[in-house]
Image (spheres, rainbow, N blue to C red):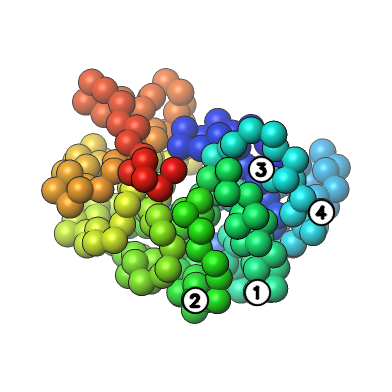
């Protein structure tokens, strides 16, 4: 568990760690880079590098939080990775269901496995489920998400590396957009961002602009036009 600088959450919780690249959005994976650093520092949890691992001892952590938290689940992994046993996914969901005071944000690129398993899981209102959609080549992830039993569904269009025209946002509650950051960051066109925002406005979906990214993401900031966009899903879900 750690406090997070990610603009749309408060903290991270990693009951699993490790992953592998499956699409273009993974090319400069921040979690892989961070894992190398943590492994070099001798952090026990990352002793196996970026190999997928489950951590039973991490399951107790949410019970220890005294105040309600907004939590990004598995910022260093993907809960629906094929190497994460379903039995462990069930354990993670049990924790989330047992702690309704917290809001959990789960994000995956493995939308097919999410869909395969969704009906076996208990989707309480405090569990938000999202898929990463970095360009038009992976928009089918939205269809898999749309048909799950998750009460709150969201898209993370970060790093946005291509235009996303004609999105079907039916049953989608929230869209996050952000540019890639880091030394080799791929550029994001402003027109792509405005187009997604317009589609959200037209379809009644909350829009959150996270960052422009680039080599110096702090300098680039997160203003779109002359303001920030920080909309969240409807308060009925929170």
115 relative position to 56: left or right: left
Q: Residues within 10 Å of mark 1 (few under 14, many from 20)?
A: some
Q: Residues within 10 Å of mark 2 (few under 14, many from 20)?
A: few
Task: Choose mark 2 or mark 3, whichever is in front.
Answer: 2
Where does residue 55 sit, x and y in percent of width and height?
77, 57
37 relative position to 30: left or right: right
Decide: marks 1, 2 in contact (CB < 8 A)? Answer: no
Q: Is residue 50 above or below residue 90?
A: above
Where does residue 89 sit, x and y in percent of width and height?
64, 67
Find numbered disc 4 in the image and state the secondary structure of the residue it sits on: helix
Q: Residues within 10 Å of mark 4 (few under 14, many from 20)?
A: few
Q: Find residue 86 and name its label.
A: 1
Label 2: which residue?
A: 119
Q: Residue at x 32, y 52 (%)?
A: 173
Between 26 and 207, the one lying in front of the other is 207
Between 96 and 33, the one lying in front of the other is 96
Q: Earlier in the sequence, mark 4 or mark 2?
A: 4
Label 4: which residue?
A: 57
């Amino acid at each position: 568990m750690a406090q997070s600088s990610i603009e749309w959450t408060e903290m991270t919780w990693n009951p699993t760690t490790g992953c592998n690249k499956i699409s273009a959005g993974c090319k400069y994976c921040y979690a892989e880079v961070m894992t190398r650093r943590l492994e070099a520092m001798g952090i026990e949890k990352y002793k196996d590098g970026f190999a997928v691992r489950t951590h039973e001892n991490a399951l107790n952590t949410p019970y220890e939080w005294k105040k309600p938290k907004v939590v990004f689940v598995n910022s260093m992994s993907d809960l629906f990775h094929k190497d994460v046993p379903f039995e462990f996914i069930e354990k993670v969901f049990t924790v989330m269901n047992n702690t309704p005071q917290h809001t959990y944000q789960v994000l995956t690129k493995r939308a097919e496995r999410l869909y395969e398993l969704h009906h076996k899981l208990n989707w309480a209102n405090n569990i938000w489920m999202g898929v990463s959609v970095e360009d038009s080549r992976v928009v089918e992830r939205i269809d898999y998400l749309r048909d799950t039993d998750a009460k709150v569904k969201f898209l993370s269009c970060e790093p946005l590396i291509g235009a996303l025209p004609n999105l079907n946002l039916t049953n989608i509650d929230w869209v996050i957009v952000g540019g890639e950051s880091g030394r080799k960051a791929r550029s994001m066109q402003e027109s792509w961002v405005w187009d997604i925002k317009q589609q959200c406005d037209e379809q009644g979906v909350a829009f959150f602009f996270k960052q422009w990214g680039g080599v110096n993401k702090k300098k680039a900031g997160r203003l779109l036009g002359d303001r920030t966009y920080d909309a969240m899903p409807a308060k009925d879900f929170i």
